[in-house]
Image (tube, rainbow, N blue to C red):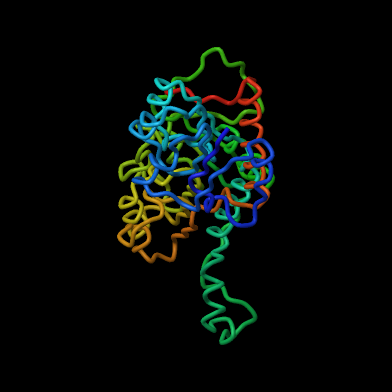
Amino acid sequence: MKGVILDTASLGQDIDLSPLTDVVNDWQMYTSTKVEEVAERIKGADIVLSNKVTLSATDIQQTTTLKLICVMATGTNNIDLVAAQKQQVLVCNAAGYATASVVQHTIALMLALTTRLTRYVDDVKEGQWQSSPVFCLLDHPIVELSGKTLGIVGYGELGRHVALVARSLGMEIITARRPGVVPTLTRRADPDEPPTLPLEDLLPRVDVLSLHCPLTAQTHHLINQSRLATMKPSALIVNTARGGLIDSEALVHALQQGIIAGAAVDVLATEPPDQHDPLLNAKLHNLIITPHVAWAARESRQRLVVQLQENIKAFLNHQPIRLVSPD
């Protein structure tokens, strides 16, 4: 078996890749791969690993040896799943490996917004504390999360774990029913489950909104100008899911005009972003941007490699693996 990894740089330099070399001894590893290089690099490969490099229908159709594509992430929008199915190429993704890391980062962003952490850090660097007439600075109002309402869009593994930590901080939890998702009528009522509301009913009630849903045709620009206008002026938004869930220009306008109080995002619509991204150019004190690192704790990335090994081993042993459906 010959294996190819198209973007090892996305895993970082501090990760042990021996779990992969233990199951396949012939690997061709590339730090990164351009779109026009994909077809040539996967030629003759049995197994291809990609994090964010796109494998188009043309790329998949041009190879006759490919048997397995392992996505080094949960999202599979970079793979033409229909073409893979037609070519009888199995596609598997990874799941659950980054839960602890993403939850930690999500809560950190909430805390940074409510404690005005970045403003106070900047104030100290600029000498504001040193010149204060009293022992502390109170220039930026701090808000407690205790007693506030957290709205979660996407109540899967990540959303549930964020809710667990948020409850420990004293927050009330409500969840949103995403557009296009039909409620399950047969689901048994659980008194411990938070109430689920249509998104339009949830938005006016929340103090903090946290997004944990996939990017689909139905969720693209889920948070737009009209929906932002229904939120409290004191509300905060945290997005550690996908940049395309939020209309960036609408968010900048809402932050500038005081329609909402603040936002923290770990993801942008295009990554890596260009210099024209409206969020990067806004330079707003009530906006925090981190570079898609919510998932990236070292422990998380190592679990990902182990999960990739398990998927490949199962494939080689003709055992079931986590398969992705084209729909």
Q: Is residue 296 above or below residue 199?
A: below
Q: Quadrant of residue 99?
A: top right
- Residue sitting at x 66%, y 32%: 310
Q: Nearer the viewer, residue 312 or 11?
A: 312
Total marks drawn?
Answer: 0
Residue 307 visible in the current orientation: yes
Residue 152 visible in the current orientation: no
Figure quadrant of the C terminus: top left
Q: Nearer the viewer, residue 18 or 160?
A: 18
Residue 247 falls left or right of residue 153: left
Q: Nearer the viewer, residue 124 or 312?
A: 312
Measured from the top left, where is residue 35 in percent x and y?
A: 36, 45
Q: Is residue 265 above or below residue 149?
A: below
- Residue sitting at x 55%, y 43%: 150
Measured from the top left, where is residue 170 in percent x and y?
A: 66, 46
Measured from the top left, where is residue 224 in percent x and y?
A: 33, 43
Figure quadrant of the N terminus: top right
Q: Nearer the viewer, residue 273 or 188?
A: 273
In this view, the residue farthest toward the top is 186
Residue 147 falls left or right of residue 259: right
Measured from the top left, where is residue 8 in percent x and y?
A: 54, 50
